[in-house]
Amino acid sequence: MYGKLVNGNIEYASTKAIITDEQIITNPQREDYLANGYKEIVNNAPQDAEKEYIPEYIEQEDKIIINYKEV
């Protein structure tokens, strides 16, 4: 899964196409996402479904990590 952080929220990349001002890339591959500014998303989803959590995003050079804080 790939995405970008925009104003503190994740904008997920489409799995069907990447549309830019210059081209349309269908069936994008890893290198297509990276070349268009998307980063791999690492989702550390909580295991306890009975508790309530809010996501916290950590953006690194090559990925966005989603951790969850219990509320």
Image: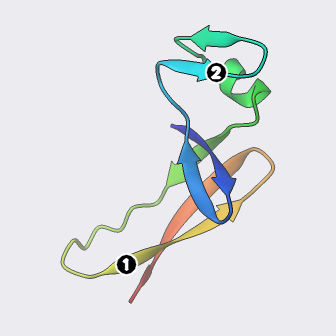
Secondary element at tag 1: strand
The residue located at (52%, 11%) in the rendering is 27
Callout 2 amino acid: Ile
Apparent side of residue 71 relative to residue 30 in the rendered image (left or right): left
Q: Is residue 58 above or below residue 22?
A: below
The answer to whether marks 2 and 1 mark residues whose Cβ atoms lie closer than 8 Å is: no
Instruction: Say which residue appears at 21% left-offset and 71% top-offset.
Output: 49
Label 2, residues with CA under 10 Å away: few <14, some 14-19, many ≥20: few
**Residue 8 placement: quadrant:** bottom right
Q: Residues within 10 Å of mark 1 (few under 14, many from 20)?
A: some
Q: How many marks?
A: 2
What residue do we see at 61% from left, 66% from top?
57
Q: Position of residue 62 (x, y in %)?
A: 75, 44
Q: What residue did someone put label 2 on?
A: 19
The Cα atoms of the two marked residues, 2 and 1, are separated by: 33 Å
37 shown above or below 18 = below
- Residue 54 is situated, as x and y percent measured from the top left of the image, at 43, 76
Disc on the earlier residue, 2 or 1? 2
Q: Is residue 41 placed above or below 71 in the rendered structure?
A: above
Indicate the secondary structure of the residue bearing disc 2: strand
* Residue type pointed to by label 1: Tyr
Of residues 44 and 17, which is closer to you in this image?
17
Q: Residue at x 18, y 78 (%)?
A: 50
Residue 7 or 54: which is nearer the viewer? 7
Looking at the image, residue 1 sits to the left or right of residue 35; the answer is left
For the C terminus, give its image quadrant: bottom left
Q: Which residue is mark 1?
A: 53
Judge depth for marks 2 and 1 and give the one in front.
Answer: 2
What's the coloring here?
rainbow
Nearer the observer, 54 or 49: 54
Query: What is the x, y in percent for residue 11?
Result: 57, 48
